[in-house]
Image: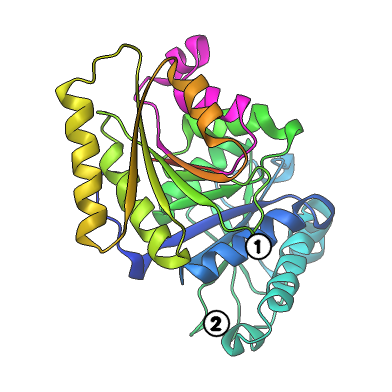
Amino acid sequence: MTKKQEKINPQTLKFLTAVSSAEYSKPTLKLGSLIASVFDASLGVVYVGERASEFHGSSVNMTRQNLDNWNIIHPGLEVLEWALKELKALNPDDESLAKIKFNADHVYEEDGRVRVFLPGEDACRIELILREGELVNQLRKEIQLENYDLAIIGGSQDKRHLAHSLIQYLPSSIFVLQKFNPRKKYKLLLLVDDSKATKKSVQWGALIAEKLGWPVRTLTVSKTKRFGAGYQGAADMAKAYFEDKGIEVEQFFLTGDPVRTFVEFAGDNHFVIMGASTLNPVKQFLFGSKPIKTLERSNVPILIVR
Protein backbone atom coordinates (compact mmCIF):
# COMPACT_ATOMS: atom_id res chain seq x y z
CA MET A 1 0.00 0.00 0.00
CA THR A 2 1.40 3.42 -0.94
CA LYS A 3 0.89 6.76 0.76
CA LYS A 4 -0.69 8.52 -2.17
CA GLN A 5 -3.88 9.43 -0.27
CA GLU A 6 -2.17 10.53 2.95
CA LYS A 7 -1.36 14.06 3.98
CA ILE A 8 2.30 15.01 3.60
CA ASN A 9 4.24 14.83 6.86
CA PRO A 10 7.31 17.06 6.37
CA GLN A 11 9.02 15.42 9.35
CA THR A 12 9.07 11.94 7.80
CA LEU A 13 9.75 12.63 4.12
CA LYS A 14 11.66 9.93 2.24
CA PHE A 15 13.24 10.57 -1.17
CA LEU A 16 14.75 8.04 -3.59
CA THR A 17 17.44 8.61 -6.21
CA ALA A 18 18.52 5.97 -8.73
CA VAL A 19 22.16 5.91 -9.85
CA SER A 20 23.82 4.04 -12.68
CA SER A 21 27.47 5.19 -12.71
CA ALA A 22 29.76 7.94 -11.48
CA GLU A 23 30.00 9.22 -15.05
CA TYR A 24 26.29 9.68 -15.70
CA SER A 25 24.69 9.93 -12.24
CA LYS A 26 26.70 12.68 -10.58
CA PRO A 27 24.32 15.57 -11.48
CA THR A 28 21.24 13.61 -10.36
CA LEU A 29 22.87 12.50 -7.10
CA LYS A 30 24.07 16.04 -6.41
CA LEU A 31 20.63 17.53 -6.89
CA GLY A 32 18.95 14.66 -5.04
CA SER A 33 21.24 15.29 -2.07
CA LEU A 34 20.55 19.02 -2.20
CA ILE A 35 16.79 18.55 -2.35
CA ALA A 36 16.82 16.02 0.48
CA SER A 37 18.92 18.41 2.56
CA VAL A 38 16.56 21.33 1.97
CA PHE A 39 13.57 19.26 3.07
CA ASP A 40 15.46 17.41 5.82
CA ALA A 41 14.35 14.16 4.17
CA SER A 42 15.96 10.74 4.37
CA LEU A 43 17.59 9.72 1.09
CA GLY A 44 17.67 6.31 -0.50
CA VAL A 45 20.23 5.64 -3.23
CA VAL A 46 19.50 2.59 -5.37
CA TYR A 47 21.49 0.88 -8.11
CA VAL A 48 19.53 -1.50 -10.34
CA GLY A 49 21.67 -3.99 -12.24
CA GLU A 50 20.89 -6.78 -14.66
CA ARG A 51 19.81 -10.01 -13.04
CA ALA A 52 22.72 -12.44 -12.93
CA SER A 53 21.91 -16.01 -13.95
CA GLU A 54 23.89 -17.38 -10.99
CA PHE A 55 21.37 -15.80 -8.63
CA HIS A 56 18.11 -16.90 -10.19
CA GLY A 57 17.38 -19.07 -7.16
CA SER A 58 15.07 -18.16 -4.31
CA SER A 59 17.85 -16.65 -2.20
CA VAL A 60 21.32 -15.18 -2.46
CA ASN A 61 23.91 -16.41 0.02
CA MET A 62 25.54 -13.13 0.99
CA THR A 63 28.63 -14.43 2.82
CA ARG A 64 32.25 -13.40 2.75
CA GLN A 65 33.08 -16.56 0.82
CA ASN A 66 31.19 -15.36 -2.26
CA LEU A 67 31.81 -11.64 -1.79
CA ASP A 68 34.53 -11.52 -4.47
CA ASN A 69 32.18 -13.19 -6.93
CA TRP A 70 29.42 -10.74 -6.01
CA ASN A 71 31.69 -7.78 -6.66
CA ILE A 72 32.64 -9.14 -10.08
CA ILE A 73 29.02 -9.67 -11.06
CA HIS A 74 27.75 -6.44 -9.55
CA PRO A 75 29.65 -3.23 -10.29
CA GLY A 76 26.75 -1.64 -8.41
CA LEU A 77 28.64 -2.03 -5.13
CA GLU A 78 31.40 0.20 -6.48
CA VAL A 79 28.80 2.71 -7.67
CA LEU A 80 27.17 2.77 -4.23
CA GLU A 81 30.57 3.27 -2.59
CA TRP A 82 31.18 6.18 -4.97
CA ALA A 83 27.74 7.57 -4.12
CA LEU A 84 28.51 7.59 -0.40
CA LYS A 85 31.82 9.38 -0.98
CA GLU A 86 30.04 11.90 -3.18
CA LEU A 87 27.35 12.51 -0.57
CA LYS A 88 30.04 13.16 2.04
CA ALA A 89 31.76 15.66 -0.26
CA LEU A 90 28.45 17.38 -0.96
CA ASN A 91 27.60 17.64 2.75
CA PRO A 92 30.91 18.48 4.48
CA ASP A 93 29.19 19.81 7.60
CA ASP A 94 27.16 16.65 8.22
CA GLU A 95 29.06 15.04 11.08
CA SER A 96 26.88 11.93 11.24
CA LEU A 97 27.39 11.31 7.54
CA ALA A 98 31.15 11.81 7.86
CA LYS A 99 31.34 8.99 10.43
CA ILE A 100 29.81 6.41 8.10
CA LYS A 101 32.19 3.79 6.71
CA PHE A 102 31.46 1.79 3.57
CA ASN A 103 32.38 -1.87 3.99
CA ALA A 104 31.58 -4.20 1.12
CA ASP A 105 31.48 -7.09 3.61
CA HIS A 106 28.37 -5.58 5.15
CA VAL A 107 25.85 -6.51 2.50
CA TYR A 108 22.64 -8.30 3.38
CA GLU A 109 19.85 -9.73 1.33
CA GLU A 110 16.45 -8.68 2.61
CA ASP A 111 13.05 -8.21 1.01
CA GLY A 112 14.25 -9.28 -2.43
CA ARG A 113 17.13 -6.84 -2.65
CA VAL A 114 20.53 -6.18 -1.11
CA ARG A 115 21.04 -3.49 1.50
CA VAL A 116 24.48 -2.15 2.36
CA PHE A 117 24.71 -1.82 6.13
CA LEU A 118 26.56 1.36 7.01
CA PRO A 119 28.38 1.16 10.37
CA GLY A 120 27.89 4.34 12.34
CA GLU A 121 24.63 5.25 10.58
CA ASP A 122 22.50 5.65 13.73
CA ALA A 123 21.99 9.40 13.28
CA CYS A 124 22.21 9.40 9.49
CA ARG A 125 19.28 9.02 7.11
CA ILE A 126 20.98 7.39 4.14
CA GLU A 127 20.10 4.03 2.56
CA LEU A 128 22.26 2.27 -0.07
CA ILE A 129 20.36 -0.41 -1.97
CA LEU A 130 21.30 -2.85 -4.74
CA ARG A 131 18.60 -4.50 -6.85
CA GLU A 132 18.54 -6.85 -9.83
CA GLY A 133 16.14 -6.82 -12.74
CA GLU A 134 14.21 -4.44 -14.98
CA LEU A 135 14.72 -0.84 -13.86
CA VAL A 136 11.17 0.50 -13.63
CA ASN A 137 9.84 -2.66 -12.00
CA GLN A 138 12.61 -2.67 -9.39
CA LEU A 139 12.19 1.02 -8.60
CA ARG A 140 8.46 0.44 -8.18
CA LYS A 141 9.13 -2.40 -5.74
CA GLU A 142 11.62 -0.31 -3.76
CA ILE A 143 9.18 2.59 -3.48
CA GLN A 144 6.39 0.28 -2.36
CA LEU A 145 8.63 -1.48 0.16
CA GLU A 146 9.99 1.66 1.82
CA ASN A 147 7.02 3.98 1.18
CA TYR A 148 9.10 6.68 -0.50
CA ASP A 149 7.33 10.00 -0.99
CA LEU A 150 9.36 11.20 -3.95
CA ALA A 151 11.51 9.69 -6.70
CA ILE A 152 14.13 12.04 -8.17
CA ILE A 153 15.14 11.35 -11.76
CA GLY A 154 17.26 13.06 -14.41
CA GLY A 155 15.61 14.78 -17.33
CA SER A 156 18.11 14.63 -20.19
CA GLN A 157 16.79 14.19 -23.70
CA ASP A 158 18.04 10.62 -24.05
CA LYS A 159 16.11 9.64 -20.93
CA ARG A 160 12.75 11.06 -21.99
CA HIS A 161 11.38 7.63 -22.89
CA LEU A 162 12.48 6.26 -19.53
CA ALA A 163 10.96 9.24 -17.74
CA HIS A 164 7.64 8.46 -19.41
CA SER A 165 7.75 4.89 -18.11
CA LEU A 166 8.57 6.12 -14.63
CA ILE A 167 5.67 8.58 -14.68
CA GLN A 168 3.30 5.83 -15.75
CA TYR A 169 4.32 3.10 -13.35
CA LEU A 170 5.97 4.46 -10.20
CA PRO A 171 3.60 4.84 -7.21
CA SER A 172 5.33 7.88 -5.67
CA SER A 173 5.47 11.50 -6.67
CA ILE A 174 8.22 12.11 -9.24
CA PHE A 175 10.57 15.08 -9.62
CA VAL A 176 12.02 15.33 -13.14
CA LEU A 177 15.16 17.46 -12.91
CA GLN A 178 15.25 18.71 -16.49
CA LYS A 179 17.36 21.89 -16.58
CA PHE A 180 16.93 22.39 -12.84
CA ASN A 181 19.31 25.09 -11.57
CA PRO A 182 19.59 25.04 -7.76
CA ARG A 183 20.93 28.61 -7.76
CA LYS A 184 17.92 29.97 -9.60
CA LYS A 185 14.93 31.44 -7.78
CA TYR A 186 12.00 29.99 -9.66
CA LYS A 187 8.38 30.99 -9.59
CA LEU A 188 6.30 28.09 -8.39
CA LEU A 189 3.58 27.26 -10.91
CA LEU A 190 0.85 24.99 -9.63
CA LEU A 191 -1.54 23.56 -12.21
CA VAL A 192 -4.97 23.38 -10.60
CA ASP A 193 -8.01 21.48 -11.85
CA ASP A 194 -10.70 19.17 -10.49
CA SER A 195 -8.50 16.05 -10.52
CA LYS A 196 -7.96 13.92 -7.41
CA ALA A 197 -4.26 14.81 -7.24
CA THR A 198 -4.81 18.57 -6.94
CA LYS A 199 -5.11 18.59 -3.14
CA LYS A 200 -1.82 16.72 -2.76
CA SER A 201 -0.22 19.04 -5.34
CA VAL A 202 -1.27 22.02 -3.25
CA GLN A 203 0.32 20.46 -0.16
CA TRP A 204 3.61 19.95 -2.01
CA GLY A 205 3.41 23.49 -3.38
CA ALA A 206 2.97 24.98 0.08
CA LEU A 207 5.83 22.89 1.49
CA ILE A 208 8.19 23.99 -1.29
CA ALA A 209 7.15 27.62 -0.98
CA GLU A 210 7.78 27.53 2.77
CA LYS A 211 11.18 25.86 2.38
CA LEU A 212 12.51 27.87 -0.56
CA GLY A 213 10.60 31.14 -0.40
CA TRP A 214 9.56 31.04 -4.04
CA PRO A 215 6.55 33.11 -5.19
CA VAL A 216 3.47 31.01 -5.93
CA ARG A 217 1.16 31.08 -8.92
CA THR A 218 -1.79 28.84 -9.66
CA LEU A 219 -2.96 28.25 -13.21
CA THR A 220 -6.34 26.81 -14.18
CA VAL A 221 -6.94 26.11 -17.86
CA SER A 222 -10.31 25.43 -19.48
CA LYS A 223 -10.80 24.33 -23.06
CA THR A 224 -13.81 26.68 -23.23
CA LYS A 225 -14.58 30.11 -21.84
CA ARG A 226 -16.56 28.50 -19.04
CA PHE A 227 -14.87 27.45 -15.80
CA GLY A 228 -17.13 24.92 -14.13
CA ALA A 229 -17.81 24.47 -10.44
CA GLY A 230 -15.11 21.79 -10.17
CA TYR A 231 -12.37 24.01 -11.59
CA GLN A 232 -13.47 27.07 -9.62
CA GLY A 233 -13.80 25.07 -6.43
CA ALA A 234 -10.30 23.62 -6.84
CA ALA A 235 -8.82 27.08 -7.44
CA ASP A 236 -10.62 28.47 -4.37
CA MET A 237 -9.38 25.54 -2.27
CA ALA A 238 -5.80 26.12 -3.38
CA LYS A 239 -5.95 29.83 -2.63
CA ALA A 240 -7.43 29.24 0.82
CA TYR A 241 -4.81 26.60 1.66
CA PHE A 242 -1.91 28.90 0.78
CA GLU A 243 -3.42 31.88 2.56
CA ASP A 244 -4.00 29.81 5.72
CA LYS A 245 -0.25 29.22 5.76
CA GLY A 246 0.54 32.89 5.18
CA ILE A 247 1.70 32.32 1.59
CA GLU A 248 0.69 34.86 -1.03
CA VAL A 249 -0.61 33.39 -4.26
CA GLU A 250 -1.44 34.77 -7.71
CA GLN A 251 -4.29 33.07 -9.54
CA PHE A 252 -4.56 32.78 -13.32
CA PHE A 253 -7.47 31.46 -15.39
CA LEU A 254 -6.79 30.88 -19.10
CA THR A 255 -8.61 29.19 -21.97
CA GLY A 256 -7.10 26.97 -24.64
CA ASP A 257 -5.38 23.64 -25.06
CA PRO A 258 -4.24 22.67 -21.53
CA VAL A 259 -0.77 21.34 -22.35
CA ARG A 260 0.14 24.08 -24.81
CA THR A 261 -1.08 26.71 -22.34
CA PHE A 262 0.87 25.13 -19.47
CA VAL A 263 4.09 25.09 -21.48
CA GLU A 264 3.74 28.61 -22.88
CA PHE A 265 2.88 30.08 -19.48
CA ALA A 266 5.71 28.25 -17.72
CA GLY A 267 8.36 29.55 -20.13
CA ASP A 268 11.80 28.93 -18.63
CA ASN A 269 11.46 30.53 -15.19
CA HIS A 270 8.89 28.36 -13.44
CA PHE A 271 9.05 25.21 -11.37
CA VAL A 272 5.93 23.29 -12.37
CA ILE A 273 3.84 21.14 -10.03
CA MET A 274 1.02 19.08 -11.48
CA GLY A 275 -1.03 16.05 -10.50
CA ALA A 276 -0.42 12.64 -12.03
CA SER A 277 -2.83 11.34 -14.64
CA THR A 278 -5.73 9.15 -13.52
CA LEU A 279 -5.70 7.26 -16.84
CA ASN A 280 -4.61 3.65 -16.64
CA PRO A 281 -1.15 2.86 -18.09
CA VAL A 282 -2.56 1.40 -21.32
CA LYS A 283 -4.58 4.55 -22.10
CA GLN A 284 -1.58 6.71 -21.15
CA PHE A 285 0.56 4.75 -23.60
CA LEU A 286 -2.00 4.99 -26.40
CA PHE A 287 -3.22 8.55 -25.89
CA GLY A 288 -0.65 10.20 -23.64
CA SER A 289 -1.43 12.23 -20.55
CA LYS A 290 -1.11 15.86 -19.51
CA PRO A 291 2.04 15.23 -17.40
CA ILE A 292 3.74 13.20 -20.13
CA LYS A 293 2.87 15.69 -22.86
CA THR A 294 3.96 18.60 -20.66
CA LEU A 295 7.26 16.85 -20.01
CA GLU A 296 7.75 16.28 -23.75
CA ARG A 297 7.21 19.92 -24.67
CA SER A 298 8.81 21.82 -21.77
CA ASN A 299 12.31 22.30 -20.41
CA VAL A 300 11.51 23.34 -16.86
CA PRO A 301 11.75 21.14 -13.76
CA ILE A 302 8.47 19.34 -13.08
CA LEU A 303 7.11 17.70 -9.95
CA ILE A 304 4.37 15.19 -10.76
CA VAL A 305 2.33 14.46 -7.66
CA ARG A 306 0.50 11.25 -6.75
Disc 2 element: loop
Q: Residue flagged by tag 2: what amino acid is it? A: Glu
Observer-nearest of 104 and 285? 285
Judging by the rendered image, the residue that carries numbered circle 2 is: 121
Q: Nearer the viewer, residue 8 or 139?
A: 8
> Which structural element holds mark 1?
loop
Residue 183 is tagged as 1
Identified by mark 1, the residue type is Arg
Residue 112: x %, y % from top left: 52, 50
Q: Quadrant of the N terminus?
A: top left
Check the image and report above or below for 19 versus 99.
above
Q: Write down the quadrant of residue 96 in the picture.
A: bottom right
Could you tell me which residue is drawn at 61 percent across and 25 percent down? Answer: 296
Instruction: Residue 231 in the image: state x and y as whole percent.
Output: 23, 27
Binning the other alpha carbons within 10 Å of mark 1 as few (below 14), some (14 to 19) or many (20 upward) gives few
Residue at 77%, 53% (x, y): give it. 74
Quarter that holds the C terminus: top left
Residue 210, percent from left and from top = 38, 65
Q: Which residues are magenta?
A: 274-301
**Residue 128 in view, yes or no:** no
Residue at (43, 13) in percent of width and height: 283
The residues bearing labels 1 and 2 have C-alpha atoms spaced at a distance of 30 Å
Q: Closer to the N terminus: mark 1 or mark 2?
A: 2
